[in-house]
Image (tube, rainbow, N blue to C red):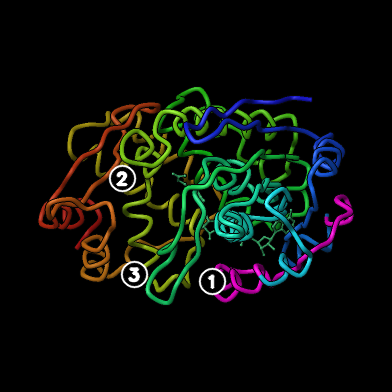
Amino acid sequence: MDRLLIQAPSGAYHLHFGPGIWAELGELARSFDGVVVVSDQNVAALYAHRLPFPLCVLEPGEGTKSFDQVARLVDQWAELELSRYSLVVALGGGVIGDLVGFTASLFRRGISYVQVPTTLVAQVDSSVGGKTGINTPRGKNLVGAFYQPKGVFIDPAVLKTLPRREITNGLGEVLKYGVIQDGALFELVSRSIPAFYQVALDVVGPVIRRCVEIKGAIVAADETDWGLRRILNHGHTFGHALEQATGYRVYRHGEAVLLGMFLEARLAHYLGLLPAASLREIEAALLRVQLEYRFDQVDKQTLLRALGQDKKNRAGAISFILPREIGKVEEVLLSAAEVEKFWDEVMGA
Ligand code: NAD
Ligand code: GLY
């Protein structure tokens, strides 16, 4: 069995890869004093039979990451008589992983949980690193905790049942790892976009493994996101602003990150940080992904207002993680006026 150790300061755990994860997890689960699997309707119908334990099935979708669902899960786990020595299995995408991790951090002041991520986003990003949380009417991921799982079990083959749009959604995060830390990974993924849509496991499997290796090292160095971990926000400043400016109705998060990377690469070039040849490579890769967008439909003032509310802003400046080359990024703080000047000169008024 292929494994990778994540050495988070609050506790080390393994990432397990490949088709053998189901049997391995089944065996691990039997050593706990009670087990429950939590999933959503789509994923449960496809994969819950592989983990024959009591099951809580939730509605798919972002609305499930709520205080109401936390309360319901707590009730169900208490009814199942889960103790402090029991295990919760989060089987699904980032919605299930974030909600279950957060609820696990609260139940009996903290119960063990493992992640079985089933989307590309969850396999390369959300299942690793212990960020858990829910949404409230006042904000996405407004409430949460850093709470590491006891293990992450990744079977890339489950991506074969994923809708195409969810592959696009995950490709944003995959390309991001290349831009922030690994030029060779970027080049490989850029050449292999069709292999992702076909879920060609000989390509997709090793790429997922490399992405979580990068994320695991970043989390080990900065678990609680005050330093190095912030480089994972490349593409997210413009990305979040686009999501917010379009009422979270137009783009999935990963799609917005893809567009954010596009804009931030242009911004880096505009500021003289990124050479023209690297900008062309980044643009070419992003244009190979199946995503429709029209920047001329973005209202500049709405976008600037959204940028002004970004949680990473410091001392009145907007924080961007910008590439200097493919594989190397740095934080740049800009005023709203500087961003507006870029938008007018490069993206059109
Ligand atoms: P998701 O969990 O909503 O899943 C997307 C859709 O795919 C759902 O309808 C789901 O039922 C379906 N699905 C999942 N796996 C499937 C499979 N194998 N086959 C068929 N259908 C499948 O979306 P997501 O993109 O995985 O997660 C988004 C969430 O993750 C957001 O709430 C975001 O805030 C969070 N997130 C968290 C982190 C973190 O570090 N904790 C990082 C990135 C994103
Ligand atoms: N998804 C960004 C992080 O885990 O920090």
Tell me if label 3 and label 2 are in contact, CB under 8 Å. Answer: no
Three-letter amino acid code of the residue under disc 2:
Glu
- Above or below, 232 against 51 in this view is above
Which disc is residue 245 wearing? 3
Residue holding disc 2: 264
Q: Residues within 10 Å of mark 1 (few under 14, many from 20)?
A: some
Three-letter amino acid code of the residue under disc 1:
Ser
Q: Residue placed at 73% from the left, 61% from the top?
A: 39
Q: Is mark 2 within 8 Å of ligand 2?
A: no
Q: Which residues are magenta?
A: 48-74
Disc 1 versus disc 2: nearer the observer: 1
* In the foreground, 42 or 49: 49
Quarter of the image where the N terminus is located: top right
Q: Secondary structure at mark 3?
A: helix
Q: Residues within 10 Å of mark 3 (few under 14, many from 20)?
A: many
Q: First in sequence, mark 1 or 2: give its number.
A: 1
Q: Secondary structure at mark 1?
A: loop
Q: Is residue 59 magenta?
A: yes
Separation (CA) of disc 1 from disc 2? 32 Å
* In the foreground, 65 or 180: 65
Quarter of the image where the C terminus is located: bottom left
- Left or right of 79? Residue 124 is left
Q: Residue placed at 75% from the left, 40% from the top?
A: 155
Q: Secondary structure at mark 2?
A: helix
Residue 76 % position (x, y)? 72, 70
Q: Quadrant of ligand 1?
A: bottom right
Q: First in sequence, mark 3 or 2: give its number.
A: 3
Residue 53 % position (x, y)? 86, 56
Separation (CA) of disc 3 from disc 2? 17 Å
Q: First in sequence, mark 1 or 3: give its number.
A: 1
Q: Residue furthest top?
A: 184
